[in-house]
Amino acid sequence: MERRTKSFQQIYEEYAYVVDYLPYGKPGLRLKHRAGAVVQLVGEEYFTLLEAVVKEGVVLKPSDRVYIGKNSRREVLYIIGRARYDDLTANAKMELENVIEKIVLNREAYFVGFFNTAKPVTPRMHALELIPGIGKKYMWKILDEREKKPFESFQDLQKRVNLPNPAKLITKRIIEELTGESKYRLFTRAS
């Protein structure tokens, strides 16, 4: 009998943004090596929520971008692991929307590409409709406009479709995915 194995490739974040800095660590959190400052982070590419121990003498603030990849890190000693939305501190939850919007704006070309290539997720629902604020009317307008000419920027999308602040709408969608309020994932990966 032939036995099949499923190949699984681990996907790692290279950079992340600080959503909270805890100078005295996190109560109840057991660390591998030593107690110290802990940061809660959101990944730049997959919006992975993480917790990490900060190197001694390093002080970080919300919205700071830090390298967390496999090579030599300047600010982070080691990654504790992934976090769920419910594991975030109240401060981290408050900062999350601003930090995610900053990431979305920095990766504008990627998200504009989403509007240019999004497809239906079921026979009755289009991926565009999963973005808060986009119903059938906006969906059809986006599909019609992108057929004429692909969107070049959020501003172009806003101007041609009259869609209010696409970056904010995508940010809201990402937060819905992180909080577990959504069945479908467009921009994040399951925890």
Image (cartoon, rainbow, N blue to C red):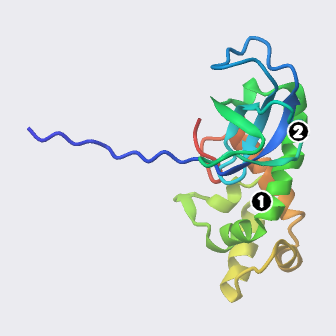
What is the number of the mark on residue 60?
2
Image quadrant in which the C terminus is located:
top right
Q: Look at mark 1 in the image and give the residue it sits on.
A: 134
Most foreground residue, 161 or 75: 75
- The residue carrying pointer 2 sits among few (fewer than 14), some (14 to 19) or many (20 or more) residues within 10 Å by Cα, namely many
Give the residue type at disc 1: Ile
In the rendered image, the vertical position of residue 183 relative to residue 166, given as above or below = above
Q: Residue at x 74, y 24 (%)?
A: 87
> Can residue 131 be seen by looking at this rendering?
yes
Q: Residue at x 68, y 45 (%)?
A: 68
Q: Secondary structure at mark 1?
A: loop
Q: Position of residue 161 (x, y in %)?
A: 83, 75
Q: Which of the two discs, 1 and 2, labels the residue nearer the N terminus?
A: 2
- The residue carrying pointer 1 sits among few (fewer than 14), some (14 to 19) or many (20 or more) residues within 10 Å by Cα, namely some
Disc 1 versus disc 2: distance between alpha carbons? Answer: 36 Å
Give the residue type at disc 2: Leu
Residue 102 location, quadrant: bottom right
